[in-house]
């Protein structure tokens, strides 16, 4: 059974409709299968008298050709109404350009359609910033862009348990610095289920239908294969696809900085830069960049040559980690769910923290520096969060391990800019002097 899940981006669309009143179009970017088309159509059904959805992946060349000549908008609107059997009503209807990167001229037409002001316009796009899709057109300034991520943990709880109370309760516990006590173990098990299923709506839907994690795994494999096919269309040499499949092995290294040359061999620097830009623009991954000087604004000191790459969905990441098997057996999932798999899963927890921080609107940065007495070894702070003129450092542990040496040393080194500091781990909420030690399921609330 196909379900329409409640998504937070709906409220953002509602805000755009109410405040902009057709003065801009809104473009929802995101990886394929994160649910862009579904939520946009649901929004159109609920908030407008009528709508037309033009899926540029499927629509005929005749429809695409309508945007070659914009001198007669009346003709274009009549053609669209006739073809889609929909009556449009001025200021009460919306036209959706789904997968608009497949028709660059339609995206360029937004400038004139907005000026006409008869209808509202919503665009969705995957791999939307790829150079070949935009090099011959003028990007409209009348276009707002927002990114849609896979379902976050709160959306997952809405979908799986119809639970709208737990996350607000988490906020109260966090504000009062109160441990969750006997409830913590249950919450960790439920959160590990989120890590395994992930936030792709198809995977969540399959879990609700079958309650079988192997069946969910097959859905995730289909999504991953779709991404790989997309990468190969962008880059026939398959280098982006190789990088995507290498993510688990890269993150599992002691120094988990992504090393493109380990995967691709020698690549010219300008070509490598283009490949990495295309990879990031796909929205299937999250880049965390090294901040060379945390004393200043983090984006100003980012090192574009030093970065980590995470999967945008941890559920897909788990499946990638077992890609060599035909499917990930239920016994592996059960051990992961019970936190009993022998493999070191620290990098899985780091991935889910990256996903949760990004979905909460944070840009991702990390910091490393050499130890004074042993320059062969390094300190590392996993994430640096910018909060005004202050920095909130975050260290991630895959266990209940409470030592936070790197965090402590960073706070000494940059005491003038550090405010709050966090250790994210698998045990209950508690404080250790200035460090707030938080269970991983609270990550999105910091």
Image (cartoon, helix red, strand yellow):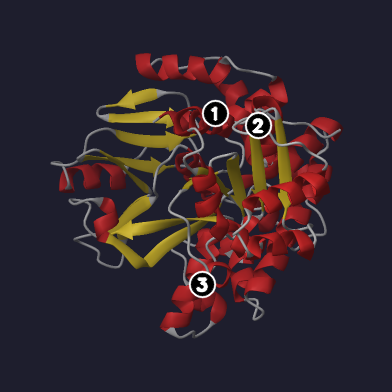
Depth order, front residue of 222/52: 52
- How far is the residue under mark 3 from the one under mark 1? 31 Å
Q: Quickly name the residue at label 1.
A: 14
Estimate how packed mark 3 is, as few (under 14), some (14 to 19) or many (20 or more) residues with alpha carbons within 10 Å.
few
Depth order, front residue of 95/264: 95
- Where residue 27 appears, as percent x and y from the top left, is 54, 47
Name the disc covering residue 150, or none: none
Q: Quickly name the residue at label 3.
A: 135
- How far is the residue under mark 3 from the one under mark 2? 31 Å
Q: Quickly name the residue at label 2.
A: 43
- Where residue 428 appears, as percent x and y from the top left, is 47, 24
364 displayed left or right of 322: left
Q: Are marks 1 and 2 in contact (CB under 8 Å)?
A: yes
- Where residue 377 appears, as percent x and y from the top left, is 31, 63
Report the residue at 70% width, 60% height from top: 66
Q: Secondary structure at mark 3?
A: loop
Q: Do we see residue 338 in this rendering? A: no
Compare marks 1 and 2 and give the one earlier in the sequence.
1
417 displayed left or right of 177: left
Compare marks 3 and 1 and give the one earlier in the sequence.
1
Does 244 appear above or below 386? Answer: below
Report the residue at 51% width, 37% height from top: 22
Report the residue at 66% width, 45% height from top: 96
Q: Are marks 3 and 2 in contact (CB under 8 Å)?
A: no
- How far is the residue under mark 1 from the one under mark 2? 8 Å
Check the picture and name the quadrant holding the C terminus: top left
Does 261 appear above or below 39? Answer: below
Q: Do we see residue 153 in this rendering? A: yes
Q: Are marks 3 and 1 in contact (CB under 8 Å)?
A: no
- Where residue 295 appears, as percent x and y from the top left, is 18, 50
Estimate how packed mark 2 is, as few (under 14), some (14 to 19) or many (20 or more) residues with alpha carbons within 10 Å.
some
């Amino acid at each position: 059974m196909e379900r329409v899940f409640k998504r937070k981006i709906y409220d953002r669309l509602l805000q755009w409709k109410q405040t902009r009143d057709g003065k801009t179009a809104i473009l929802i970017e995101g990886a394929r299968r994160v649910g862009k088309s579904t939520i946009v159509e649901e929004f159109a059904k609920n908030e407008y008298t009528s709508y037309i959805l033009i899926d540029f992946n499927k629509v005929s060349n005749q429809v695409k050709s309508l945007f070659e000549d914009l001198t007669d908008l009346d003709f274009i609107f009549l053609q669209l109404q006739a073809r889609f059997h929909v009556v449009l009503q001025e200021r009460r209807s919306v036209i959706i350009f789904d997968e608009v990167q497949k028709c660059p001229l339609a995206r360029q037409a937004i400038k004139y359609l907005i000026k006409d002001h008869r209808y509202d316009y919503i665009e969705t796009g995957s791999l939307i910033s790829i150079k070949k899709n935009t090099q011959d057109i003028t990007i409209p300034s009348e276009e707002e862009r927002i990114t849609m991520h896979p379902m976050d943990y709160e959306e997952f709880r809405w979908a799986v348990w119809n639970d709208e109370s737990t996350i607000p309760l988490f906020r109260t516990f966090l504000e009062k610095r109160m441990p969750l006590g006997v409830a913590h173990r249950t919450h960790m098990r439920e959160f590990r289920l989120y890590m395994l299923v992930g936030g792709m709506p198809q995977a969540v839907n399959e879990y609700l239908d079958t309650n079988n994690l192997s069946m969910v795994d097959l859905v995730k494999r289909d999504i991953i294969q779709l991404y790989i096919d997309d990468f190969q269309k962008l880059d026939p040499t398959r280098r982006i696809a190789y990088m995507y499949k290498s993510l688990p092995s890269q993150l599992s290294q002691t120094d988990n900085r992504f090393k493109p040359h380990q995967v691709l061999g020698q690549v010219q620097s300008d070509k490598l830069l283009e490949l990495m830009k295309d990879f990031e623009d796909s929205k299937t991954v999250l880049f965390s960049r090294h901040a060379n000087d945390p004393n200043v604004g983090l984006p100003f000191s980012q090192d574009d040559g030093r970065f980590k790459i995470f999967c945008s969905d941890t559920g897909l990441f788990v499946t990638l980690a077992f890609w060599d098997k035909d499917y990930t057996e239920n016994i592996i999932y059960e051990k992961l769910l019970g936190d009993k798999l022998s493999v070191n899963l620290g990098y899985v927890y780091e991935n889910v923290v990256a996903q949760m921080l990004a979905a909460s609107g944070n840009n991702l940065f990390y910091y490393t520096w050499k130890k004074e007495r042993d320059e062969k070894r390094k300190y590392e702070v996993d994430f640096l969060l910018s909060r005004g003129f202050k920095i909130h450092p975050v260290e991630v542990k895959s266990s209940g391990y409470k030592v936070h040496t790197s965090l402590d040393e960073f706070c000494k080194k940059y005491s003038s800019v550090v405010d709050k500091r966090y250790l994210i781990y698998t045990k209950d909420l508690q404080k250790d002097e200035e460090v707030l030690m938080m269970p991983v399921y609270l990550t999105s609330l910091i």
